[in-house]
Image: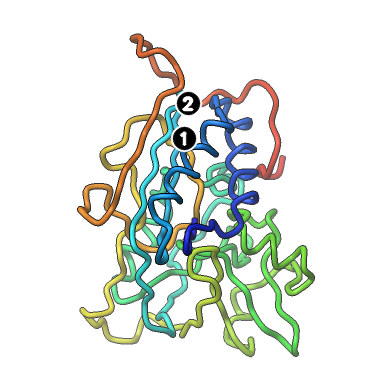
Amino acid sequence: MRLENGEYFLLERHLTRLRQSALYFSYPMDELRVRRELGDLAATHAQGTWRVRLQLDSTGMIQMDAEPLVLQPEPWRVALANEPVNSRNRFLYHKTTRRSVYDAALAAHPACRDVLLWNEQGEITESCLANVVIAVGGREYTPPLSCGLLPGTLRGALLDADQISERVIRKDELVRADAVYLINSVRGRIRVKMVDHAEPLEAELCSSAAPSAEGFSGDNPLEAGESAGAMNPSSPAAERRSYNPRPATPRSRSKPSRRGARSGPRPPP
């Protein structure tokens, strides 16, 4: 999440997405406590612009990280992924720390800031760090969730405001588009330059590592906030808060259950 001068950008959308994923994976979530913790964090970061990440694990434990937001020069160099993603992978529809798909795509293109993903039907889905928008004939389009992608909060806000529309985007459309953008709630709209495999590697353009779960316990913790480059939880610039709303008694941890109420995005049947 973007925290600027004590105010969270699109906070309600972030919390709604987190709540929906918590229901889907049967993770307990004390939303009142989450809001209080976010308020406390904002009060101690009332000046400047911060990138805040909130994680919820399978026991209901919350961890928050705050790090100064550093903008990167544009346009970002972006490549197309080498391999397709599986649009039936349920983790593509939820923001979690399970990022092997994104990490592999970024590792295959070390000279790029980001990588565009596509599914088994040859349809563009998202990037490793953001949603995708193309401009064609004076209109702007983003892929529908059914292609296999995260419902980004800025994406949702722009759709609700009729500033962008959903439609399937084929891989070959990228070269014909008037422009290609990345969007997320932390960095806003990002101009990109598409590159191909033939362009030489440039060490100074190596991509940042994607957010990970290093130093945090839990079975694929859920996250609130957009992926927008590296956040190292051990960095001295980052501040960390955590709490566990349950008594500190020994317990076994199980994989996320698919039972019970579900809401929010899900892969097609």
**Position of residue 142 measured from the top left corner of the image (x, y, whole percent):** 67, 69
Residue that appears at 51% across and 26% down: 256
- Are discs 1 and 2 less than 8 Å apart at CB? yes
**Position of residue 247 measured from the top left corner of the image (x, y, whole percent):** 41, 12
Q: Which mark is residue 41?
A: none
Numbered disc 2: secondary structure: loop
Q: Nearer the viewer, residue 118 or 155?
A: 155
Q: Amino acid at mark 2?
A: Gly
User: How is colour applied across the structure in the image?
Assistant: rainbow
Q: Residues within 10 Å of mark 1 (few under 14, many from 20)?
A: many
Q: Horizontally, is 123 left or right of 246 in the view?
A: right
Q: Horizontally, is 205 left or right of 102 in the view?
A: left
Q: Amino acid at mark 1?
A: Leu
* Count of marks placed on residues: 2
Give the residue pinned by disc 2. Answer: 60
Give the residue pinned by disc 1. Answer: 56
